[in-house]
Image (tube, grey):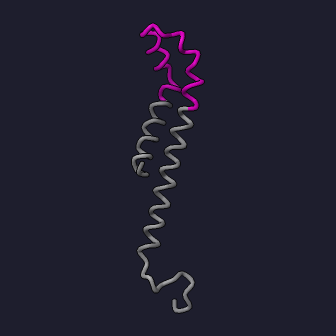
Amino acid sequence: MKAKSMIRVGAWGTGITALCCFTPLLVVGLGIAGLSALTVYLDAVLLPLLAMFVVCTLWGLLRLRQAAQRKQLDGKPSGESVGSPHS
């Protein structure tokens, strides 16, 4: 998966999971659907899911940053070095 796609998936997943985690949206939805017995398991599912999406976002940001650094280093002329005495 590309870094930008990973960031996009992680950000959307984090937002939706946080919305379900911190608001009674999912509890009301399950109650309307007649599945209110499942609300006991919401914390066991939503908190690890939230952590997974946050890690996915951070991983994508790290990969994007590394790619940018690699691109910046590849863009320098081959005869030039950082600690060159001619600079």
Q: Give the residue at x 56% y 25%.
A: 45
What predominant SS class does the magenta segment belong to?
A: helix
Question: Which is more toward the observer, 15 or 45?
Answer: 45
Relative to 5, residue 74 above or below: below
Q: Give the residue at x 45% y 35%.
A: 13
Which quarter of the picture shows residue 51? top right
Q: Residue furthest top?
A: 34
Expressed as whole percent of the image width and height from the top left, the position of residue 40 reads: 58, 15
How many dots with numbers?
0
Question: Which is more toward the observer, 22 or 74?
Answer: 74
Q: Give the residue at x 52% y 49%.
A: 59
The answer to whether residue 29 is left or right of residue 38 is left
| Residue 70 among magenta residues | no
Q: Give the residue at x 46% y 41%.
A: 10
Expressed as whole percent of the image width and height from the top left, the position of residue 1 reads: 42, 48
Q: Residue furthest front?
A: 1
Relative to 80, residue 59 above or below: above
| Residue 32 among magenta residues | yes
Expressed as whole percent of the image width and height from the top left, the position of residue 47 reads: 58, 30
Range covered by the magenta-colored residues? 19-48
Relative to 36, residue 59 above or below: below
Expressed as whole percent of the image width and height from the top left, the position of residue 85 reads: 56, 91
Relative to 42, residue 10 above or below: below
